[in-house]
Image: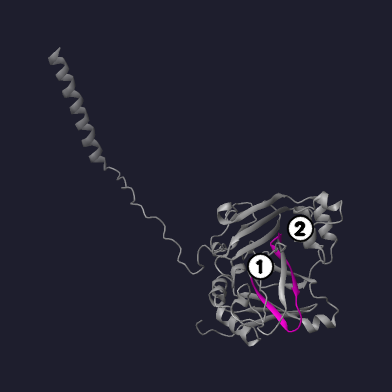
């Protein structure tokens, strides 16, 4: 039984590369065509507190030999990229998907394209067997960088990269090196959690990128965790019609926040917050948007951040209404004339009444 993938917030999921060509990349993103490493599972938390967004993403791979890489769109330039807590994401999953007590009793649950300037490298670091590079550039420039570093673009990747670069030219490239993993005694299938810290006005979660390299009818399943100071407003609003369901929508429990703070490098977790989990389960052709979040409490998520309106689109012109005619003040002699006319009318009416009487 294939276990449901948890693909989150900003993950660019790349798929298996095998000996066959063409369809082997159908569930992929940016991959080394000669490698045998492939992405098994990614899980992500997008947390927002005091104007700072933390993306906690864990990559798991299986296979052996070669390199594997993925590129992730970011809403802003990171101030830091470091290893995140070892069990933070598992604790979140336990909070919203507690194990069935019946399984505990028997020992566990059952298995489940114009010319551009070259991309600018603005940050490089290594976390375990992942080589992390933060890039700044247009879609074509980032695609060129990926090709120059030995990766193959799926046919829909150029349009997808342009789609994200029009709103934010920042991308994170993560390359997994199996030989480095072996040297560090990292087993295939081990997760590598990454914390990307960015100052932003509001968190923004790219979802459309999960459809990269997928056939239109391929089913995309994803869990997006959000941790915000206040209950967020989301665009598009989760609904069965768009294959998005709000699975958790509640104040984060004290026990959960206490547990998260105890994990390595997770001391920034606030004392209180709002926990949301959005489950996505539907065909790739339906996922044509991202997730805009207004965490301020004002309830106005951005249509641009949701990918429903291009950042380059002109703002709609304000409605034009005809001005009301201005009232002119009468001159004194005009006022006297009007008054005399009214007196004459009153006198005429009085004479008419007397005559009839």
Left of 163 or right of it: where is 16?
right
State yes or no: residue 50 in magenta: yes
Marks 1 and 2, how far apart at CA = 17 Å
Q: Relative to 214, is 321 above or below?
A: above
Find residue 321 and report its horizontal and vertical position in percent.
Answer: 36, 52
In the structure shown, which secondary structural element does the residue marked by tag 2 occupy? helix
Left of 355 or right of it: where is 133?
right
Q: Tell me the number on the disc at residue 93.
A: 2
Residue under numbered circle 1: 10
**Over which residues does the magenta segment extend?**
47-73
Find residue 309 and report its horizontal and vertical position in percent.
Answer: 50, 64
Left of 156 or right of it: where is 333?
left
Q: Relative to 118, is 101 above or below?
A: above
Q: Relative to 299, is 2 above or below?
A: below
Q: Main secondary structure of the magenta part?
A: strand
Find residue 210 and report its horizontal and vertical position in percent.
Answer: 62, 68
Residue farthest top in this picture: 357
Residue farthest left in this picture: 355
Quarter containing the N terminus = bottom right
Quarter containing the C terminus = top left
Mark 1 surroundings within 10 Å by alpha-carbon count, few (fewer than 14), some (14 through 19), many (20 or more): many
Q: Is residue 191 visible?
A: yes
């Amino acid at each position: 039984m294939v276990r449901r993938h948890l693909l989150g917030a900003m993950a660019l999921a790349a798929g298996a590369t095998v000996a066959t060509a063409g369809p082997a990349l159908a569930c992929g993103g940016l991959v080394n065509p000669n490698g045998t490493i492939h992405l098994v599972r990614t899980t992500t938390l997008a947390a927002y507190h005091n104007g700072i967004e933390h993306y906690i993403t864990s990559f798991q791979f299986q296979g052996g030999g070669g390199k594997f890489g993925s590129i992730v769109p970011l809403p802003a330039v990171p101030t830091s990229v470091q290893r995140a807590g070892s069990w933070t994401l598992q604790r979140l999953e336990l909070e919203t998907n507690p194990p069935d007590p019946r399984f505990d009793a028997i020992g566990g649950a059952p298995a489940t394209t114009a010319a551009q300037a070259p991309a600018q490298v603005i940050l490089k670091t290594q976390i375990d067997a992942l080589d992390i590079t933060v890039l700044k550039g247009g879609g074509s420039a980032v695609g060129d960088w990926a090709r120059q570093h030995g990766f193959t673009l799926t046919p829909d990747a150029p349009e997808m990269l342009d789609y994200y670069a029009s709103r934010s030219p920042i991308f994170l490239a993560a390359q997994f090196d199996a030989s480095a993993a072996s040297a560090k005694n990292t087993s295939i299938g081990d997760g590598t959690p990454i914390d990307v810290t960015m100052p932003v006005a509001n968190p923004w979660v790219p979802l459309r990128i999960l459809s990269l390299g997928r056939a239109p009818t391929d089913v995309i399943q994803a869990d997006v965790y959000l941790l915000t100071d206040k209950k967020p407003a989301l665009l598009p609003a989760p609904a069965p019609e768009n294959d998005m369901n709000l699975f958790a929508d509640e104040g984060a429990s004290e026990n959960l926040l206490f547990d998260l703070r105890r994990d390595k490098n997770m001391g920034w977790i606030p004392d209180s917050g709002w926990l949301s989990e959005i489950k996505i389960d539907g065909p790739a052709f339906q996922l044509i948007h991202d997730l805009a979040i207004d965490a301020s409490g004002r309830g106005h998520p951005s249509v641009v951040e949701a990918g429903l309106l291009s950042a380059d689109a002109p703002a709609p012109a304000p409605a034009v209404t005809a001005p009301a005619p201005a009232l002119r003040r009468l001159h004194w002699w005009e006022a006297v004339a009007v008054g005399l006319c009214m007196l004459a009318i009153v006198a005429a009416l009085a004479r008419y009444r007397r005559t009839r009487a």
